[in-house]
Amino acid sequence: MLLDISNLTVKYPSRHGEFTALKDVTLTLEAGEILGLVGESGAGKSTVGNAVIGLLAKPGFVDHGRITLTGQQLVGRPEPEMELLRGARVGMIFQDPMTSLNPLETVGWQLCETIMLHKHCTRRAARTHAIDMMESVGIRDAGERFDHYPHQFSGGMRQRVVIALAICGDPDVIIADEPTTALDVSVQSTILDLLRTICRERGVGMILVTHDMGVIAEVADRVAVMYRGEVVEVGKTREILTAPQHKYTQSLISAVPRADVKIERFPLISYIEDAGTPDLARLKARWTKPKGAQSDIALSVRDMSVEFITQRAWTGRKSKVFRAVQSVSFDIPRGTTLGIVGESGSGKSTIARTIAGIYQPAEGEVTLNGMSLTKASTRDAKLRRRDLQMIFQDPYSSLNARMRVQQIIAEPILFQKGRAARDEAMRTADDLLDIVGLGGAAGRKFPHEFSGGQRQRISIARALATGANFIICDEPTSALDVSIQAQLLNLLKDLQQELGLTLLFISHDLPVVRQMCDRVCVMKKGVIVEQQETEQLFASPQHAYSQQLLALAPKLLR
Amino acid sequence: MLKLILNRLAHSVVVMLAVALIAFSMVAFLGDPISNMVGQDTTVAERAALRENLGLNDPLPVQFVRFLSHAVQGDFGLSYSLRVPVSELFAERMPATLELSIISAIFALLIGIPLGIHTAINRDSFTTQAILSSSLVGVSLPTFLIGILLILIFGVMLRWLPTFGRGDVVMIGGWSTGLLTSSGLRSLVLPVATLTIFQLTLIIRLVRAEMMEVLRTDFIKFARARGIRRKALNYRHALKNTMMPVITVVGLQLGNIIAFSLITESVFQWPGMGLLFVQAIGNADIPVMVAYLMIIALIFVLINLIVDLLHFVLDPRLHSSGAN
């Protein structure tokens, strides 16, 4: 046995007493094996990895239990000895390749530094070894790229550098903490392939920490499911995915959006926080019908292009521009949902922001409820955009931390109706909080007192506050756990049904798009390569890129 | 690189022109230069002739261009009160101010950066608390008070060090330096100490804050996870990433020290530009004030240029092309 963790208990002392992050965790890992560690945020899966490598965030400590690496006990080893083990016996790969490398030094320098440390060799020998390492993790022209800085690599290539750094000391165990979460699906699958190859060829044991069941299904030999600091189930990947024994595992797996069939509602994990049912009848009563021409098309975009100036012109010379979006056109019928999918940098968020008026289009026309937004005076366009609201991706930065929730929701109402409507606005805010399942009392609290999912509910309440009937959702659930995601998507579906909302739903997650959208646009490099009814797209994608995206998306069962 | 330098130089020229315009309007609109130059018994005809001679009847743009061309050559006219060319006055005084400011900045960096690192790494240790609270005292006391206290202790009570002037100076090609004589060096100690204490607090706290920020980043954690030793981590990885904002602030502060060292110079009767400027205000000596304004602006512009170039050299993200 390579790594043996038994009864590991980690505690964090705090002002309100001790918090137990891990409780009697027992796991084993063989050489050449990939052990998946899944669970939702706060389950303690990263803490296991940090404990093994001896980098527990302060003031956390191992209360009791053993971590044995080929017979050597790691718990309680003094820091100087742990320092010698790191990189040489235990390696680690982090989530975000953008921030894992020192931005001021070349990739080669960072590799050589690490190799010289572990192999005690000359700089010249280290250089040769580093170039070999870079080649073995699939970096082409390694000799040339040796002298490049991290920012000159793409996200996927950077993660390869990170992997090279993690394995260049020949560790026996690698802890990969969400190694592909920050990457696009096509890059994700190549990195997962690389990790698997490394484990097989070098006989390295890997603990793969992730929240993504798809990733687990793809590469893990065995899976351990964690819930609130405890391992609730361990077993072969296939067995766990097809026949989960523990109730939590069952609900966790059922909450993962499926790419293969469309279902009406997402199954909920009753295990986690209670959602509360929205009181929709009351909401409907106060809902105002969209103003203006009653066309069937809620939003229409014609030949819209968006440009960014990358290099400003001096006199005479033309500015260099980057076309983020190239003449896209689509219509969204009232009461339906249009999805936009694509990898990062494909321009999908730019479309959302241009419709919302954050960017100005270079060309083309945007029409909301039959009224043009682009061919109107700034003032008129502002008035017309009142029917449009936006929900952002990051529930942590999209709410003002110094305002109470009630004020946050009431703000758009006050902005439209003036100070006089203050009492009414506050009442509406309380009602909305009730409707999204947080309860009116939540209005007195500040955003930091809520979890990510609850904050996203607040964002939805804010978007609904002015009675808007068109809502742009820019990756609304990509920062959330699957159980919370399921609740939130259900809420959006219910609201849409009751209020006839029209949604523009932007996401990189194909299964989610399948469950939420009526039509889907697939974007690549600023262009819509395919626009199709959802069912048809998933059944028979026409464009090569759509086929590729669908094929690469991790599947739970294959 | 060349493009950046040209770009920054163009910015600098614009800034200098704007300052020159302000300086010129001081000459043109503050008081009558003729009555400042001549005695009471000069006749009206003589005054008019002088006015014509000096070109004061020309249109303002012409006068401005003439002012510029003179300024570029370092010619700011005669001092009203001292009756000597302003350029000579500054050539005499500038070395004193620059030596004082730059030496104090070097000391502040040499002491401040290690202390900042120490307080960032050993966050809650006793020495950290001691350094932080005593540095707070340093910034709370105004410079003149520190100067006077130093004079009192080391000059008056202990009689170790001189309390005013530069001591003996040596001329090296038009630059008078106090660094080569023992009395010159001894004279430097107290004013340099005063200015160093003033700058030290900011540097310690800035380095500490930046360093703590960098130590929290992922790449430091990743470096630890692959076994990089503590020392290399702190001094090779973290320190370099800490230096960017430190360079910016230290550059601006050096400009401030040079421009506003007049308090320290007054306290120590240091024969620098600051002291000259204070006297010029007292005598309404406009040519001296104009020259001071232009020189200080030039120093700021130059320091900022150097700071930009240092950033450019240190940060590869500014000089190597982006992701491909």
Image (cartoon, helix red, strand yellow):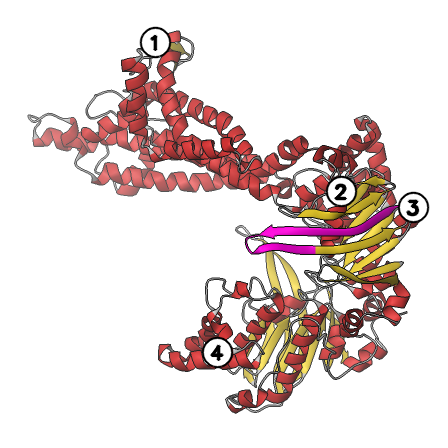
The front one of B58 and A540 is: A540
Q: Looking at the image, which residue sits at the far right?
A: A201
Depth check, mark 4 against mark 2: the one in front is 2
Sequence-earlier tag: 4 or 2: 2
Is residue B206 left or right of A264 when viewed as pictured? left
Q: Which residues are magenta?
A: A1-21
- Residue picked out by circle 4: A429
Rounded to the nearest angstrom, the CA distance separating label 3 from label 2 is 24 Å
For the residues bearing labels 3 and 1, Cβ distance under 8 angstroms: no
Whether residue A376 can be seen here: no
CB within 8 Å, label 4 to label 2: no
| Residue B121, position as x, y percentages in the image | 58, 35
Q: Which residue is mark 3?
A: A203
In three-dimensional space, the C-alpha distance between marks 4 and 3, rounded to whole angstroms, equals 58 Å
- Three-letter amino acid code of the residue under disc 1: Asp
Residue type at mark 2?
A: Val
Q: Chain of mark 4?
A: A
Chain letter, disc 3 residue: A
Give the CA distance from mark 4 to mark 2. Answer: 51 Å
Tell me, yes or no, whether the highlighted magenta stretch contains residue B108: no
| Residue placed under numbered mark 1 in the picture | B168
Q: Are marks 2 and 1 in contact (CB under 8 Å)?
A: no
For numbered disc 1, what is the local secondary structure? Answer: loop
| Amino acid type shown at disc 3 | Gly
Secondary structure mostly taken by the magenta-highlighted segment of the chain: strand
